[in-house]
Image: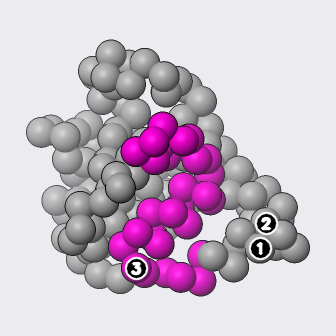
Amino acid sequence: MTFTLFFDGSCPLCVAEMDQLRALNQAESLKFEDILAPDFKSRFPDIDPMEASKILHGKLSDGTLLLGLDVTHKAWSLVGKKRWIGLLRLPVIRWFADKAYLFFARNRYKISYLFTGRSKCEPCQNGVCSIAEEKPDNHKN
């Protein structure tokens, strides 16, 4: 099974998480697609980049679309790490966790600035955000 993650390649925290997942993707069950890539719309006409910038999108190999923390939970489950994220999908917690995620998604550039000192990544070259080049230790879990 392949799970495709559609992420914002200009968000430092988003890119850092994708870098962690890439490093753990031994079984190659995850694919990573930057919604800001120039050819994104032509390669994924069924994924609206504007909607994907509001909430994380992921697609299972059977075409099933997952959103938000369901994407995060699925991705980390596939690499066998951060099992605690499953707690955020429990019925009692899910509503609150989803609201918190949507707050993060709306404010990810400001939150990224607080944690990394920059609100956006430098323009990508060869499909790699400059944050990955400057902070190789982002691969640690």
Q: Secondary structure at mark 3?
A: loop
Q: Residue at x 72, y 53 (%)?
A: 103
| Relative side of 129 to 79, left or right | left
- Graded by Cα atoms within 10 Å as few (under 14), some (14 to 19) or many (20 or more), the crowding at tag 3 reads few
Residue 16 visible in the current orientation: no
* Image marks 1 and 2: residues in contact by CB distance under 8 Å: yes
Residue in front for this viewpoint, 95 or 119: 95
Q: Secondary structure at mark 2?
A: helix
Residue in front for this viewpoint, 34 or 59: 59
Where does label 2 land, which residue? 94
Looking at the picture, how far across and down is residue 90, in whole percent?
77, 73
Vertical relation: 85 (above or below) 16: below
Quarter of the picture holding the N terminus: bottom left
Residue 140 visible in the current orientation: yes
Where does label 1 land, which residue? 90
Q: Earlier in the sequence, mark 3 or mark 1?
A: 3
Q: Any mark on residue 80, and which?
A: 3
Residue span colored magenta: 57-85
| Relative side of 12 to 101, left or right | left
Q: Amino acid at mark 2?
A: Arg
In 3D space, how far apart are the residues under numbered discs 1 and 2 (Cα atoms)? 5 Å
Q: Amino acid at mark 3?
A: Gly
Q: Residue at x 70, y 72 (%)?
A: 88
Looking at the picture, how far across and down is residue 111, in whole percent?
57, 58
Looking at the picture, how far across and down is residue 59, in whole percent?
47, 43
Q: Amino acid at mark 1?
A: Leu
Tell me the quarter of the picture where residue 13 sits.
bottom left
Q: Nearer the viewer, mark 3 or mark 2?
A: 3
Q: Residue at x 34, y 52 (%)?
A: 2
In 3D space, how far apart are the residues under numbered discs 3 and 1 (Cα atoms)? 19 Å
Q: Secondary structure at mark 1?
A: loop
Magenta region includes residue 41: no
